Amino acid sequence: MLLLRPIVRGSWVLQRTPRLAAVAWGAHPQVWTPSRTHGTWSLGDGSRRWKVTAVGALLGLGAGLAYGDHRRRAAEAEPDAEAMPGAPYPVFTRQEVGRHRSLAERVWVTYGHEVFDITDFVELHPGGKSKILLAAGGALEPFWAMYAVHSQEHVLQLLRAYKVGELSPEQQSQPTQGDPYAGDPPRHPALKVNSLKPFNAEPPAELLTETYLTPNQLFFKRNHLPVPAVAAASYRLQVEGPGGRVLELSLPELKRRFPKHEVTVTLQCAGNRRSEMSRVRQVKGLEWGVAAISTARWGGVRLRDVLAHAGYGEEEAAGEQHVCFEGLDKDLGGAAYGASIPFRTAMGRGADVLLAYEMNGEELPRDHGYPLRVVVPGVVGARNVKWLGRVSVSREESPSHWQQNDYKGFSPAVDWDTVDFTTAPAIQELPVQSAITAPAPGATVPPGELTVKGYAWSGGGRGVVRVDVSLDGGRTWRVAELTGEEQGPGRAWAWRLWQLTAPVPPDAAELDIVCKAVDASYNVQPDTVEPIWNLRGVLSNAWHRVRVTVAEE
């Protein structure tokens, strides 16, 4: 996906910028001149060259997707330590930097006291030109504050490959940017944090299956942007009806006009168990363990009822239609998190898609979408939009980055140089899944009997009919006992917890514990990760393995 392009700077930059042309560089023995060699700069004598690679996603949406690849490429392109010692940079005011806001005038940005020309990277930005151009002519800091991954030295080193100048000393100080995450809610200290800004965390695996319903404080947290502060008194849900008519509903109106519906639903992140794919080959995304999955009893109103009230009927499903959701969580450019589901998923008879305002009998916590969120049973967590602001029906899927350019699966043969997100469908229903939550990997267990615990779930309402467990790496198997709510055919929205108590084989020094689930359509988990590996590390559902040592305590 990311291609190296020639980065050519030098006298032609001077010609485009009056202030630069006025700088008397002739007094300096070493002058930068453009080299036509692909991806290099040369000093005037051509004796030394500084290798330059394309910088990764410098800011905005999609930065995480290409980040690892950029770091690899940077390592492969170590600059010559002797290149351009003491080479001078021209000085600019912020007003002069601000004139470079378009491709025609070159795209400049600042970071700290330095000025960078990132024009050559604009077309490569994974989030699209529109996102990276939000910073054109200004400072990167407000955008980088949204994505803490940028605050690392090697990222700054890559950025400096695009340096063209220094800020005027009197203009180097900027008003301190407020932290967009400062208003996030407090979180439970037991959570394993995968990312602070935005906040993403999972509960300890051993706590995950202690109760059938996951306590709200321990329910996994998946945020893409800062948690918005929404005032219930002023909150209005906008529902776009046929012909563009917009229906606005306050939370009290929703509760008064539509019957309350409750359903127990398991939500799972598309990246659950991604860390296992990373052990095969590096992928892009948060290193989730086995606990980016949780279950709650949700209360709210059926989306079907609200859409019917807005003027939609089941006949709309005759053509391919989509229900699009837009959240109130937004980036600094005003772009909201969004997603969509097929119209038939929302409007089918008996559809359980909720606009939820309760979670486990309590008001929705802020981290989980207060005051209103979408809950789409059997579908990947990414479509369960939180802090819901708008609902519409369209012949096209949501234009959101997260619908179009993320949360899609690809062949193991596809890499970041060849990926085309338009060729793959957006993930909706998830495949059958199970994992071991006890004992923990690397634990020491006593001889005698061993109890193994875990969870199993399948997307699309397909119930789990069996979980097989092996203590010897899959050579022999036993059937685990399933617990949890009984659920109707095609509406098995929640997980089954499972448990197996079995004798530890005599003289065993180690156990290779494995589990695999079978759903109502007799789908079964693949035995290894390699055939399902993909560059985003999604849909990770191979047999789960935990190795433990057998020894007397």
Image (cartoon, rainbow, N blue to C red):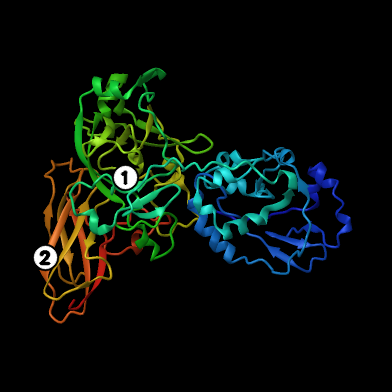
The type of residue carrying mark 2 is Thr
Residue 512 in view: yes
* Residue at the spot 25% in from the left edge and 40% down from the top edge: 377
Q: Residue at coordinates 73% horizontally, 51% vertically from top-left?
A: 164
In primary-sequence order, the first of circles 2 and 1 is 1
- The CA distance from mark 2 to mark 1 is 32 Å
Q: In which quarter of the image is the C terminus?
A: bottom left
Judge by depth and name the residue closer to the eye, 12 or 447: 447
183 lies above or below 156: above
Query: Relative to residue 151, is residue 106 drawn left or right?
Result: right
Write the residue at 19% across / 34% down.
262
Location of mark 1 (residue): 380
All told, the count of numbered labels is: 2
**Residue 40 in the image: x percent, y percent?**
70, 60
The correct choice, above or below, for 363 with respect to 483 in the image is above
Looking at the image, which is closer to me, 453 or 55?
453
Relative horizontal placement of residue 362, taking residue 415 as reference (left or right): left
- The answer to which quarter of the image holds residue 54 is bottom right
What residue does disc 2 label?
A: 501
Secondary structure under tag 1 reads loop
Q: Are marks 2 and 1 in contact (CB under 8 Å)?
A: no
For the point 86% across and 59% down, the residue is 28
Residue 525, can we see it? no
Q: What element carries label 2?
A: strand
The residue furthest bottom is: 507
Q: In the rendered structure, which amino acid carries the disc numbered 1?
A: Val
